[in-house]
Image (cartoon, grey):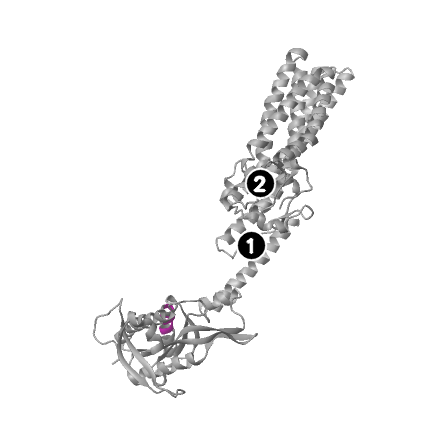
């Protein structure tokens, strides 16, 4: 929506889909509070960078200019008016060069803002590039301006040399350079960081996706340690140099020997600068070492190692942050342990759905396929087999069976000693749940035959199993109470699947499916026996079909039913 109350040269537009959320008063754009000045433009061209440049020059350039003139005049002892023209020329040149760098390093930012001004949502790659340029902008601009200042004030020193001799010219050039770099560029660095922060936040709100690779690969990249060293050393160096030159000027005014006074000033300034530099280095190390430790632990956690911890070695806020991070990692470790333990009692699909909150207490109606599988003659086998051997055999049997069922999307919801209740099509949607259930049963049968070959080889009895499968609508969900619940299916489809499994003994068939399931898989299976059988709880006979093979996997060896 267009803001009519502003003059034409300060018109900005908001994207149509978020126009109702953006106003001059709230200054909200894409859910992010931003300065209105960011979207000021002239005929669609963003003026934000230009306004940032003007404000910065108005704040910093005049004080730096006056400081350079006064210091040079004070140290060299010449008339101040004679310095105005050359210093003003150099400062003016630097102001012009600064705008060149402001413009040169902001092309993506201006394109990003132009899209917003035009009422268009920027693409994520453009937003990401704008974020990267915004966070690198302060270092790039101030770095190049500092380099340009070095050449400019070196030229100024060479200009003064023929007029005032080598020492005054060098001192004047040094003071001008230090005043510009140490004061001006440090202030500009923090000023530009503040000016670019809204751009970076807005880019993130639009959809920028910064990565560690992008961040670490950016050049120049200024870390906390580098920034602390650079800023502090420049400020201290400026202070020490100014005080040294002030003492040198005072010594000369009192009639001291120029050479001796200069030597003493250099010695004192060098000693003070060395001590200050050592203190700054120690300070930066005390801050950077805990950060490096913290980064190491974070990278380990990112790789999946939760058995790490930050080692607090101080009592400052960084140590406190490390302890808070250790607490978070401990909670993550507990959750992973719970997740692993939980997965031993429910399927991975049910576990993940419960932990993510997708399964709540209650249920929903859904068409699913239910499989019951049971070991034939289990009671008699237990009577003649030691209990330890029974448990060991069941564990080996279930280990292979559950792996096969899960590979086809089956969710084991209940263990019943010698049997399993398995759901296909829940909790995760599966349009081919019937076919997957039949394939899982057939593959489980093939694996069981191999398992029995091993048992026969060691003189153990075979494990004979039946599979009953039925498809229909059931209520699936978490059944129980908030303290303890079970994910399962409820309804006639479950009861009928159990009855079909019971018929496997009567019909001497390994895999029996109901007619409802057969109608969904008829083109994929080979069938054997067909029967209409009356079962418990049903007034009408139930039609069942024996599966003796899969069309895409016809096994040799004749009859597939159990004999």
Residue 283 falls left or right of residue 120: right
Residue 135 falls left or right of residue 541: right
Q: Nearer the viewer, residue 541 or 266?
A: 541
Q: Which residue lies furthest to the front in this view?
A: 4
Residue 545 falls left or right of residue 300: left
Q: Nearer the viewer, residue 441 or 181?
A: 441
Give the residue pinned by disc 1: 309
Q: Which residue lies furthest to the top in this view?
A: 162
Give the residue pinned by disc 2: 113
- Determine crowd level at label 2: few under 14, some 14-19, many 20+ residues with C-alpha closer than 10 A: many
Across and down, in percent, residue 51 comes to 65, 34
Residue at 35%, 87% in the rendered image? 534
Residue at 71%, 27% in the rendered image? 62
Give the vertical position of 310 relative to 92 (above or below). below
Residue at 57%, 47% in the rendered image? 204
Question: N-terminal of the two: label 1 or label 2?
Answer: 2
Give the vertical position of 311 relative to 271 (above or below). below
Across and down, in percent, residue 408 comes to 37, 67
Give the CA separation, mark 1 to mark 2. Answer: 42 Å
Confirm whether residue 467 shows in the render. Answer: no
Indicate the secondary structure of the residue bearing disc 2: helix
Across and down, in percent, residue 143 comes to 58, 31
Boundaries of the magenta span:
397-403
Indicate the secondary structure of the residue bearing disc 1: loop
């Amino acid at each position: 929506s267009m803001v009519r109350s502003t003059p034409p040269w300060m018109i900005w537009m908001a994207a149509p889909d978020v126009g109702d959320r953006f106003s001059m008063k709230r200054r909200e754009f894409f859910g992010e509070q931003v300065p209105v000045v960011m979207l000021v433009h002239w005929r669609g061209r963003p003026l934000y960078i230009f306004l940032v440049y003007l404000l910065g020059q108005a704040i910093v350039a005049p004080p730096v200019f006056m400081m350079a003139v006064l210091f040079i005049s004070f140290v060299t002892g010449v008339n101040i008016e004679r310095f105005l023209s050359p210093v003003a020329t150099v400062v003016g040149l630097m102001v012009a060069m600064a705008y060149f760098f402001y413009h040169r390093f902001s092309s993506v930012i201006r394109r990003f803002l132009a899209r917003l001004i035009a009422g268009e949502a920027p693409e994520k790659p453009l937003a990401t590039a704008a974020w990267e340029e915004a966070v690198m902008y302060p270092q790039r601009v101030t770095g190049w301006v500092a380099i340009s200042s070095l050449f400019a004030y070196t030229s100024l020193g060479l200009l003064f040399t023929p007029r005032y001799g080598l020492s005054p010219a060098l001192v004047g050039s040094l003071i001008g350079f230090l005043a510009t770099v140490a004061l001006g560029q440090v202030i500009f660095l923090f000023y530009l960081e503040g000016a670019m922060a809204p751009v970076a936040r807005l880019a993130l709100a639009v959809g920028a996706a910064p990565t560690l690779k992008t961040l670490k690969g950016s050049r120049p990249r200024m870390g906390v340690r580098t920034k602390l060293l650079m800023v502090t050393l420049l400020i201290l160096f400026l202070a020490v140099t100014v005080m040294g030159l002030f003492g040198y000027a005072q010594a000369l005014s009192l009639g001291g020997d120029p050479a001796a006074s200069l030597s003493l000033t250099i010695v004192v300034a060098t000693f003070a600068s060395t001590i200050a530099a050592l203190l700054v280095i120690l300070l930066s190390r005390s801050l950077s070492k805990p950060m490096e430790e913290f980064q190491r632990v974070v990278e380990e956690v990112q790789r999946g190692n939760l058995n790490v911890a930050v080692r607090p070695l101080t009592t400052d806020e960084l140590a406190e942050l490390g302890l808070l991070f250790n607490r978070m990692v401990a909670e993550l470790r507990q959750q992973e342990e719970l997740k692993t333990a939980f997965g031993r009692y429910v399927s991975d699909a049910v576990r993940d759905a419960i932990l993510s909150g997708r399964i709540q207490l209650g249920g929903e109606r859904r068409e699913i396929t239910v499989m019951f599988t049971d070991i034939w003659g289990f009671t008699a086998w237990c009577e003649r087999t030691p209990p330890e051997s029974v448990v060991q055999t069941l564990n080996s049997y279930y280990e292979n069976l559950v792996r096969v069922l899960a590979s086809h999307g089956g969710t084991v919801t209940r263990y019943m000693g010698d049997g399993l209740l398995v759901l296909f099509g829940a909790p995760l949607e599966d349009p081919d749940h019937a076919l997957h259930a039949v394939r899982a049963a057939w593959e489980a049968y093939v694996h069981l035959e191999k398992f029995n070959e091993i048992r026969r080889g060691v003189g153990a009895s075979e494990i004979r199993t039946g599979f009953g499968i039925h498809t229909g609508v059931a209520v699936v969900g978490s059944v129980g109470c908030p303290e303890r619940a079970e994910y399962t299916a409820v309804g006639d489809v479950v009861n009928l699947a159990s009855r079909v499994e019971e018929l496997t003994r009567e019909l001497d068939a390994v895999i029996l499916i109901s007619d409802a399931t057969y109608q969904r898989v008829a083109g994929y299976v080979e069938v054997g026996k067909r029967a209409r059988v009356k079962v418990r709880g049903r007034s009408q006979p139930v039609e069942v079909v024996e599966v003796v093979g899969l069309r895409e996997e016809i096994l040799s060896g004749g009859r597939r039913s159990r004999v």
